Amino acid sequence: MSGYFGPVQPLAYDPDAEGPALRHYDRDEVVMGKRMEDHLRFAVAYWHSFGWEGGDPFGGRTFDRPWFPADTMELAEARAEAAFDFFRILGAPFFCFHDHDVRPEGGSLTESRDRLNRIADIFEAKMAEGGPRLLWGTANLFSNRRYMAGAATNPDPDVFAYAAATVRDCIDVTHRLGGQNYVLWGGREGYETLLNTDLGQELDHMGRFLSLVVDYKHKIGFKGTILIEPKPQEPTKHQYDYDVATVYGFLRRYGLENEVKLNIEQGHAILAGHSFEHELALARELGILGSIDMNRNDYQSGWDTDQFPNNVPETALAYYEILKAGGFTTGGTNFDSKLRRQSLEPEDLVMAHAGAMDVCARGLKAAAKMLEDDRLEAARRDRYAGWNHPEAQAMLAEGATLEGIADRAVADGLDPQPVSGRQEILENLVNRYV
Amino acid sequence: MSGYFGPVQPLAYDPDAEGPALRHYDRDEVVMGKRMEDHLRFAVAYWHSFGWEGGDPFGGRTFDRPWFPADTMELAEARAEAAFDFFRILGAPFFCFHDHDVRPEGGSLTESRDRLNRIADIFEAKMAEGGPRLLWGTANLFSNRRYMAGAATNPDPDVFAYAAATVRDCIDVTHRLGGQNYVLWGGREGYETLLNTDLGQELDHMGRFLSLVVDYKHKIGFKGTILIEPKPQEPTKHQYDYDVATVYGFLRRYGLENEVKLNIEQGHAILAGHSFEHELALARELGILGSIDMNRNDYQSGWDTDQFPNNVPETALAYYEILKAGGFTTGGTNFDSKLRRQSLEPEDLVMAHAGAMDVCARGLKAAAKMLEDDRLEAARRDRYAGWNHPEAQAMLAEGATLEGIADRAVADGLDPQPVSGRQEILENLVNRYV
Amino acid sequence: MSGYFGPVQPLAYDPDAEGPALRHYDRDEVVMGKRMEDHLRFAVAYWHSFGWEGGDPFGGRTFDRPWFPADTMELAEARAEAAFDFFRILGAPFFCFHDHDVRPEGGSLTESRDRLNRIADIFEAKMAEGGPRLLWGTANLFSNRRYMAGAATNPDPDVFAYAAATVRDCIDVTHRLGGQNYVLWGGREGYETLLNTDLGQELDHMGRFLSLVVDYKHKIGFKGTILIEPKPQEPTKHQYDYDVATVYGFLRRYGLENEVKLNIEQGHAILAGHSFEHELALARELGILGSIDMNRNDYQSGWDTDQFPNNVPETALAYYEILKAGGFTTGGTNFDSKLRRQSLEPEDLVMAHAGAMDVCARGLKAAAKMLEDDRLEAARRDRYAGWNHPEAQAMLAEGATLEGIADRAVADGLDPQPVSGRQEILENLVNRYV
Amino acid sequence: MSGYFGPVQPLAYDPDAEGPALRHYDRDEVVMGKRMEDHLRFAVAYWHSFGWEGGDPFGGRTFDRPWFPADTMELAEARAEAAFDFFRILGAPFFCFHDHDVRPEGGSLTESRDRLNRIADIFEAKMAEGGPRLLWGTANLFSNRRYMAGAATNPDPDVFAYAAATVRDCIDVTHRLGGQNYVLWGGREGYETLLNTDLGQELDHMGRFLSLVVDYKHKIGFKGTILIEPKPQEPTKHQYDYDVATVYGFLRRYGLENEVKLNIEQGHAILAGHSFEHELALARELGILGSIDMNRNDYQSGWDTDQFPNNVPETALAYYEILKAGGFTTGGTNFDSKLRRQSLEPEDLVMAHAGAMDVCARGLKAAAKMLEDDRLEAARRDRYAGWNHPEAQAMLAEGATLEGIADRAVADGLDPQPVSGRQEILENLVNRYV
Ligand SMILES: [Co+2]
Ligand SMILES: [Co+2]
Ligand SMILES: [Co+2]
Ligand SMILES: [Co+2]
Ligand SMILES: [Co+2]
Ligand SMILES: [Co+2]
Ligand SMILES: [Co+2]
Ligand SMILES: [Co+2]
């Protein structure tokens, strides 16, 4: 026990508590036939919660954690100790990690791998004692200066190879720890200026890299899902995995649309000019919805603020799309959230997560009720009901032609009249649930 | 002759002119082995130049043209007269039109089609007298209230059929007039709220519609290119043809990536969070670069301002990407630009186009020089030169595996060192040309 | 009675209703010692609800109201009839109008004024029968093409004079109808391009115009408040009344900061890069908080979407700032909201307003509870408590000097330690109320 | 000599050079009666050029300078050596610094001050040998964690005092080194969340702090200008010095509008939703234009990218506004620009500055020609010529009333007709110069 968070008592569910508690998230409450824990599948992000020091472009570390700067294995172990204390307090069923945030990088690939495995030993032991499971692992291919011009898309093929070795090691560890997914976020797979960039070559290399990863997964028998996390920009001016639609086209181009799914983050959706529910609905329809990072952005900031979720109407609409997709399979709800850099205290970390879990629980319950009541879906079905008619279906069926449809339209003297979209009424309807 | 623009004298090329002239665009000047006219393939947009009345969301018509409101065939004919006078003054080799802006819609599909054909007769005659050729035609599937919830993606199948009939007629006329392309801009193919929208069904209908159009094109022997014009939003909150990458994924999904190309507009690129050159380069690499709408947006406005181009460094970077793609084939440079609504005079319309042609000509010449000098490309090749080495190529070749690459990286003790991206030096280099 | 909305039955307060009702807004419920009706002071905007036809930049009228296009006095009267039916159904205590939306403009200033007065006669009669009171009147100085380059800031002094006459007439009518405020929204007081604009002269003219208005108000004994409604842009590229801070500086410059207050719209706050609560809090601190337009924007759209409010956490934060200011005096909550253009039915108009009233009522009640419980304010006071100490106060008191403070800091060996800002904990706290 | 940049040879002016040179900036060329050096008054920013390590939110140091991390006085001295070599190579007449980037902070205010003075001794010696003059000094009140919640606006009064002591020391050093201005950029004078913020109190403290600074300046006889640098956000969610208009209101509120001017940065203008030329023109009209930071942002990035200027049409419009203001007095053109973090080489730093100086020189020369030719100003005067008429002037003169103007408008039967704003023609005109 690290002692950092005081005596380790799991947060209790208590809707009427004055002090620290979970007011809405009762893991065992059954919603649409499933325990909330199994619906939401919360995960804590190791990097933001235990690796991030509170710096920003205009200032350095504000957090005063005993394990910082964690540049020795001893400090990294102290960090692991604190992290698992925290997981127990929170009662989160999952966690996620980057190699970079669990151990200091070594002087060589081999040393880095060894260190990663030593930390994995600790994780394994803690997990065996009833600690959380691993939602996903990932490799940090963006912080070290060797990756400043990309990893798989670096103009230097040695960086491609270095990244391949790093991903291999991270998948191995993820596999060993029973990870349910493996994530690739291509933070530097993009460009700062087109002037020095061969867009076509870089995209091909990125496709190639992903194919290698998919093959490797199968070879080692890793049953988890490979996930790409889209983001439009930042740190790069343009990131290739821009948004759901872009990644879909990329997967199709390289024949990977049945092998890879997406980890979708609310903040990244917003940066790309979309609502979170749009990205979720689109991924669902394209068959590539995998997991979510449930951390929001500030709508007035043009960069990724990675804040804890706090708006119930927003989380309700997100879980509504997820429930419509049948819920998570290997995926879950990861809080890829940073404390604000002024939130210095251990209590801030605990309460930020507790508040987020409650906001998600409220959202889930509202979404479930809305889906069960079926009013929204009934209105939607009704709106498209015309397409059930035979002559409508015929237009979609094999053999239909533009001229055939056109001739019928003329012959029938079609003069379609607009019908109310009822947007405000539907918005009001949603408000009855949130 | 309409008389609207005074005596019709084509604008002359005169670099030293004080008054109205073309100062940089000499159509016969040979650039990289081709006349500028054949490079740039300028087109005037009928709708903005002759149909737009100067309204905005907070005020109505400001332009006082003799043919407004053009709601009778007589006025529509007067408009055509003025338009062809204008084309002659400008010496633009092409024009583009929507059905909606050349004739008032009729009371039925048949009447609308007949009216369209009567105007097409006039166009045909004028074109035969040496008027401009038709770069592309298109159907306006967004202004009439029947399309308020989409055309191909409307919840009402009758609207789908109505749109099909309209497009059939517009392709027919485009074909008859020798149009080199046919464009679809799905202004209302999108949604205002996800709450009333079946995203998956609408996308399928849109894919279906496009397939029908492609089949029809082949059946009638239309040799032009079918083009989609992406735009992320406005009028809809979300438009399905969001940007180049999104449309690419859409085409792949419905097996149309070899049948359809893109008409890319600078203003729409900006609205989607991209630079124009990004969209052009990406379309080139994806093999779907077709044509451009060379009208810019104001970077500080969040809606599509459709302004005439006026920044030479920007047009140079755009034509650089186009020259790298080998130039236009069926495509060209359309000015889908509106006068500002305070620019009331005929002279404003003439000079706006003349200035735009000059800005494009300067951009093209700078781009051509930059490409011929090969400094930028040499720097780019040099940056990726490592990929020419055999062990680099091996990573991309069949049979390579993640673990094989990883093992080699470990064995070779790779420790790749970052290399300067030289962004500022390359930007300075570009500035030597613009 | 117009019959347009069917039989006119005021919406009842019924929290458990299935059909149309007010579920949260009970006008007589007492909150913090005041009836909700007196807190919220709801107003319907005549223009959006009865004047707007459903057009957008890519399409024309979608709404099929019997009084459109309202270009005769008869149709304008039919519109008034329907509007007052609607006010009664809704039970809104106030309405607002522009001259432009209540009567067709006449062929001269005199005729326009006469028509305005004839409509005002109707209003007066309806109001006397128990209809709503007038929250504010205003003059539309942006729709007619004469105002395309501004009203008070037009380069043509005749437009300044024309606008002065129009405002005079509108204030007169507002005064006669017992209006509680008079609003100026300078939709075209700005510029499209700096290249043709004399910024300094235009600002001086705008200041001059406002001074004339203020003087006139006093002369005629109008006791209402003169309000400016800030907006950063749209229709203009730059609007002089950009945001609260900008208007404050403008008022100071022309000595009007004690004469004029602000009407703050959520959508305009967002367009200016601010949260609504920021604009409200700032206006309160600057002493210029007057009234609000409670219509939101879509965060993903770069133009003013003027949607009905639908997010309770947002309305709660807005009313929290208003309650901290002591509530409205002459101001109120105006819905400067447009139906979406697909919301065609009378029912859409009714339900959109009802839903908005409920969302505001929920927000108000949450805000009041939050303020009464005092937890948020206690935390805030605690955070600044250090400033109550004598040596802190001394730094703010007359006679303090930079060097004196500096010397003390050195002498005391100050080494201030950061304290948690507790942002997430406070956000969680707010979530206990919404 | 540091040796870092190789042999120190000042860059020569050579328009035809192949290698490193100044192609457009000839310091002695006379433009509008003044040497270009005296017009442009270029300054190098010590922090970005010598203090910034190439980190971003997703990665650490990329630059491998011999003086990093500069956390000892020896390294700080090595840095100074390199900086002055660089100044000599560039031939820039000025530099700017923060206390934070010239010396490591000490363990106490006294030690920090002593260290600052020891570095100032070195600067003084170097400057005496013909090095550049000091355009401005400033205190970094945002990097240290003590300032995480603001400096003058910190809830802790000890931070206010600490900041006061720091600014005192920095003004003293700026004064001693003959600085021509002293700048305050309130990077953390703002808030992350309104929930924990007392907006009114913080603004008062900020006003108080600025008054203390102004008083101190006078007391010590510092003749330079006190400048505020506006920025809307980043690092904070909201920064109080949002933009020119906001700072103007702030200065008026605290009676400082005649004491303080502005340092305006292009990138910050863009973040605030303005064009750079807007901010410059507005500051000029308000009488508070002081100096500029000539570094641009990427229009597609929502954060401050601080890139070197590279678009001549943009710099031309900026210098046009400055020339109209009569040029700089104590101000100048500071490059508050960062190399891209991939631009690792000493050559990148030299060439980035050289390119920027050339871009500014081209802009200045274009602006001067445009102003001398007077076409743009003639068009502008002509547009407002109506205001020279007596009845127009009478509306602005004392004694005019709204009703008097209104009565005249009615009596004269005014019916003002719109006049073309000629935007495209003016844009074309500008393009003849750039
Ligand atoms: Co993120
Ligand atoms: Co994430
Ligand atoms: Co457009
Ligand atoms: Co277009
Ligand atoms: Co609005
Ligand atoms: Co409003
Ligand atoms: Co900056
Ligand atoms: Co700056």
Image: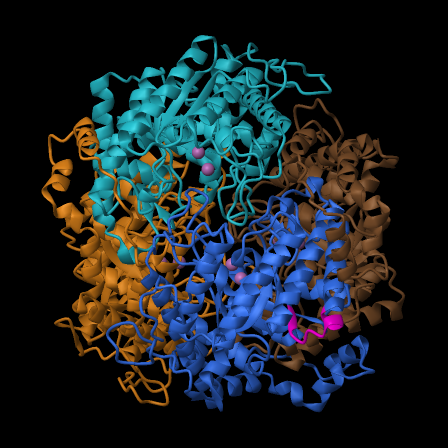
Chain colours: A orange, B cyan, C blue, D brown
Q: Residue at x 41, y 23 (%)?
A: B325
Tell me if residue D338 comes above or below residue D175 in the rendering.
above
Is D276 in front, or is B356?
B356
Label total for image: 0
Q: Residue at x 56, y 18 (%)?
A: B90
Is D414 in front, or is C14?
D414
Residue C219 is one of the magenta-drawn residues:
yes
Name the image quarter holding the C terminus of chain B.
top right
Query: Looking at the picture, how far across and down is residue D19, in whole percent?
Result: 66, 26
Q: Residue at x 28, y 18 (%)?
A: B222
Residues in magenta, as a range: C217-226
Is C427 in front, or is D252?
D252
Could one spot residue D108 in this view of the protein? no
Position of residue C233 in the picture relative to residue D77 (left or right):
left
Could one spot residue D308 in this view of the protein? yes
Position of residue D362 in the picture relative to residue B242 (left or right):
right
Tell me if residue A75 comes above or below residue B430 in the rendering.
below
Query: Looking at the picture, how far across and down is residue A166, in whole percent?
Result: 31, 50
Query: Looking at the picture, how far across and down is residue B184, in whole percent?
Result: 34, 32
Residue B159 is one of the magenta-drawn residues:
no
Query: Looking at the picture, how far across and down is residue C394, in whole percent?
Result: 75, 86
Name the image quarter holding the N terminus of chain B.
top right
Q: In which image quadrant can residue C426 be found?
A: bottom left
